[in-house]
Image (spheres, rainbow, N blue to C red):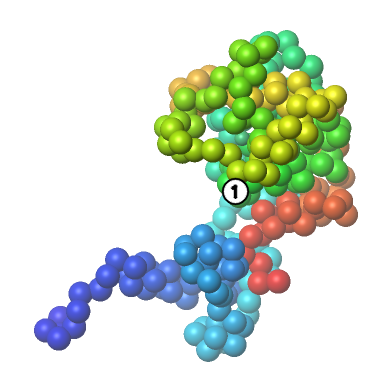
């Protein structure tokens, strides 16, 4: 090593590795602004800059070869298998609801309540998750998924729901939900489906037991009866949220 050369920082080494990995790919894979924002960077590489960096290569416009391959006509359960970071929490919550003998709509809401977190984006996960499923489920199910975002911060003694200890641990003892969440809670409290959303919180497992015995096959029939799987494949249909599923399928498509 040249004596004048500074040792590389961790982030320089990571950039180098990323560059090397990108060189090995046939097409140019780049990050959207949102992925860069999550790394604390405002900005993205333009197509001119990318072409200068990888001469003779085209932009990726399809599947990302680094990700698990999705079937041609994916179902909701395919997303569970190939895209969601973890399904354990969802399965544990839904299993709780199943054992409690709750209606199928509530069980499905529990099964899908955190797909925002494990399948899309953490921030405002209830809203994202609800929007993803809205065209395919009963309105009560997506409403409940949206509202659990606010309700989980507020106790309801009538069903034995307390403010989760986990939130004290995660957010600190002084954390206060923002005003929009407080207002949403007040609206939900007055709504005819309040108890459906509340049941999500009641069956939400805040302990995240990694050894709990759960099985996605317990829910195949409930999903089949209550989730309108599009015949073209989830993401290839023309629903108002199909693009969200397509983005999850191919998150690094250039456009
Ligand atoms: Fe949640
Ligand atoms: Fe949850």
Instruction: Determine which quarter of the picture holds residue 158.
Output: top right
Q: Number of labelled discs?
A: 1
Q: Is residue 218 visible?
A: no
- Residue pictured at 46% horizontal, 36% vertical: 174
Tell me: 41 left or right of 84. Answer: left
- Residue pictured at 73% horizontal, 54% vertical: 244
- Residue pictured at 49% horizontal, 32% vertical: 167
Instruction: Determine which quarter of the picture holds residue 127.
Output: top right
Picture coordinates of residue 147, whole percent (x, y): 72, 34
In this figure, which residue is indicated by the disc labeled 1?
123
- Residue pictured at 88% horizontal, 54% vertical: 238
Decide which of 46, 231 is in the foreground and name it.
Answer: 46
Picture coordinates of residue 128, whole percent (x, y): 70, 47
Q: Is residue 169 visible?
A: yes
Circle 1 packing at 10 Å, graded few (<14), some (14-19), many (20+), is few
Instruction: Determine which quarter of the picture holds residue 80.
Output: top right
Above or below — where is 56 with respect to 226? below
Local secondary structure at mark 1: loop
């Amino acid at each position: 090593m040249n004596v004048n050369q500074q040792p590389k920082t961790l982030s320089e080494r990571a950039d180098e590795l990323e560059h090397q990995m990108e060189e090995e790919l046939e097409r140019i894979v780049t990050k959207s602004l949102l992925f860069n924002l999550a790394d604390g960077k405002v900005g993205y590489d333009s197509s001119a800059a990318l072409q200068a960096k990888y001469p003779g290569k085209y932009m990726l416009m399809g599947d990302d070869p680094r990700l698990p391959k999705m079937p041609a006509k994916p179902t909701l359960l395919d997303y569970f298998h190939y895209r969601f970071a973890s399904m354990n929490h969802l399965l544990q919550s839904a299993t709780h609801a199943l054992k409690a003998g709750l209606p199928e709509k509530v069980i499905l809401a529990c099964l899908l309540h955190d797909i925002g977190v494990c399948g899309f984006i953490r921030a405002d996960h209830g809203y994202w998750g609800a929007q993803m499923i809205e065209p395919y489920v009963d309105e009560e199910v997506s409403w409940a998924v949206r509202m659990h975002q606010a309700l989980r911060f507020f106790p309801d003694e009538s069903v034995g729901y307390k403010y989760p200890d986990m939130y004290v641990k995660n957010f600190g003892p002084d954390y206060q939900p923002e005003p929009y969440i407080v207002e949403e809670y007040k609206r939900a409290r007055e709504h005819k489906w309040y108890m459906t959303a509340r049941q999500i919180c009641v069956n939400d497992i805040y302990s995240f037991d990694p050894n709990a015995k759960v099985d996605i096959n317990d829910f195949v029939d409930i999903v089949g009866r209550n989730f309108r799987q599009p015949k073209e494949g989830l993401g290839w249909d023309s629903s108002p949220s199909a693009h969200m599923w397509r983005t999850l399928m191919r998150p690094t498509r250039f456009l």
